[in-house]
Image (cartoon, grey):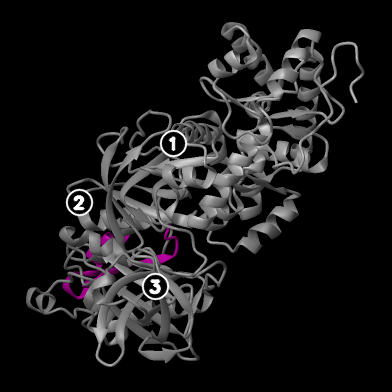
Amino acid sequence: MLIATAGHVDHGKTLLVHALTGVDTDRLPEEKQRGLTIDLGFAYLPVDGGGVLGFVDVPGHERFIRNMIAGVPAIDFALLVVAADDGPMPQTAEHLAILDLLGVCRGAVVVTKIDRVDAARAGAVSAAAADLLAGTTLAGAPVFPVSALTGAGMDALRAHLVAAGREDGHRGETGGLRFAVDRSFSVHGAGLVVTGAVYAGAVRVGDRARLAGRDLEVRVRGLESAGHAVDEARAGMRCAVNLAGRGVDVRSVARGEWLLGPDAGPPSDRVDVCLKVLATEARPVKQWTPVHVHHGAAFVTGRVTLPAGEPVAPGAEGLAQIVTDRPLCAVHGDRIVLRDTTGRRTLGGAVVIDPYAPRRARRRAERLALLQALRAHGVRKALEGALPVASEGIDPERFAWSRNLSRDAVASVAADCGALEVVTPGGPRLVPPGVYDALKSRLLASLAAHHEAEPETVGPAEEALIRDPARVHGPALARAACAALVREGAAVREGTCLRLPDHRPRLSEADAALWRRVAAHLTPATTKPLTSGDLARELNVELVALKVFLERSAKRGQLIRVARNRYFHPHAVARLARAAEDLSAARQEAGFDARSYRDATGIGRNLTIEVLEYFDTMGLTRRTGETRRVIRESAAIFGAVADTPRRDPLPREGQRAG
């Protein structure tokens, strides 16, 4: 069990720990000289019958609150120390508020220095300290009057701590490793050593792990806990970890760093939280309030943004997003302490709801409903509540990261909820049972209605088709449903359009005749088509009339307008898209430029620019500077490249569609 002291400066915390353990936790020369704790100190008390009580002695002076907060979040038990001669003081109240914000609910009050006062004074201070706990997570905690010098009351306190330690249930090994670093140093012959607390999971000798701040892979060479070499350290334990790895040294690791399991999610600089403002604050927390953010042993600066825009009053709670200047390694349920920009006053705290908060749409009703669902206790309850209100479904990998769970664990919970995993252009998504089938049925009904209303067209463009379902379901989920319908044969992709399998567009006699002439020039193999002006001259057709016909043909799905005066057969566009896909795969992360695409296709510079800009618009490619990468399968947008084009002529009005 990890125990932390808390309380006002010079109230006897360090002497108390020394009396309990025999260890002087003031290790720094400046601490010896000034007689006060500046940084975290650590001590251990072996317990008869096995087990160890670990003590974290934190600074009491207001200038070192930052160091105090770094030592408290991982603890299991708190000792709020109050000197009998002084009674409760300002830092007593602030330390208690921090313990409350961090959710520390097991602890005791220790009234020290009773050798300096009479029994009446000791009793009055004990009563005042007990009253101070009212309304906090430590309300009702026992009070122990002691003297570390004479030993009075120490046996009772020690017995209580030992009993609490035996009752202490370890947090277990649920989830991946999360180890908060509070010190790092180099040991001759061993190399880098970091000390800290295991927040979750376990760390074992020989494990591979990741230093999140610099994304460095490391190997655990050795472990030590309570002064002894161990093979494993579990959640709730303090330990020293000897690390090895390329580029890893004492300069690369500082307090606030996290040692994580290999499957942990990336850090994030936007965190959605439930914010609580201390009742002692004079003013509410307003939009974009600058704050000091304390998470684990880490300290960063940031700002508070409020989705509803309304200030959070003193003593009140509300949804908020914390935007930090450096990323945090937070997960759902983590506690955060917020202090003002001077670092002299604690404003409040927060509980993390979603560590991967979006930059946009923070105020939408859907997002607010999703946050309320994710606040639920328990993974299954949270997932069951989130699924019905997430229009794009739930990203299972991100959900796993946010809860420090394995992907398999989330898959198991999703299966228990009856959720279906759907592959979308943005990756897999979890959706409620029946929702995906209902979405596909709605899309098929929309196709049938379009064919009824516009029988002369091939069908609606995919973007137009998903626009209506996307009002209930997000476009990524609707696109996935369209792709599934095509795979299942329930719909057919014609270029950028979709149609039912038994539908064929019906043309007028005039359009059918002109189409035959146009189709001779705009074939599936024509990747360098004539401009509309050149085509009008070639066919001896008035340009204005031809443009109207070409637009009508594009609406029918027979052609695709790539540029203002360029129309292609859909199969030709699919071939050009496949060429971009192949080039992007060959160049991988480097991407490809316009010149390399021009050389690969032979379509010329000007046409290359038009084609690539069209692909950017359609979401096939993403441009960065002068290079592009394919970000979506070409077949999902333009259909597969046909080996042989369809040769049957389009039926005219009055003819039966095949």
Q: Is residue 424 above or below residue 541?
A: below
- Judge depth for marks 3 and 1 and give the one in front: 1
- Residue 605 is marked as 1
Magenta-colored span: 103-127
Residue identifier under label 2: 343
The kind of secondary structure element at disc 3 is: strand
**Nearer-N-terminus badge (3/2):** 3
The kind of secondary structure element at disc 2 is: loop
Q: Does residue 483 appear left or right of residue 400 in this picture?
A: right
Q: Does residue 75 appear left or right of residue 49 in this picture?
A: left
**Nearer-N-terminus badge (3/1):** 3
- Within-10-Å neighbours for mark 1: few <14, some 14–19, many 20+: some
Residue 24 occupies quadrant: bottom left
- Residue 197 is marked as 3
Residue visible at 27% across and 71% down? 252
Q: CA distance from mark 3 to mark 1?
A: 60 Å
Residue 393 seen anywhere in this rendered image of the structure: yes
**Nearer-N-terminus badge (2/1):** 2
Q: Is residue 182 above or below residue 21?
A: above
- Within-10-Å neighbours for mark 2: few <14, some 14–19, many 20+: some
Residue visible at 23% across and 76% down? 14
**Three-letter code for the amino acid on which mark 1 is drawn:** Arg
**Three-letter code for the amino acid on which mark 2 is drawn:** Gly
> x, y (%) of residue 20?
31, 82
Along the line of sight, the residue nearer the viewer: 322 or 506: 506
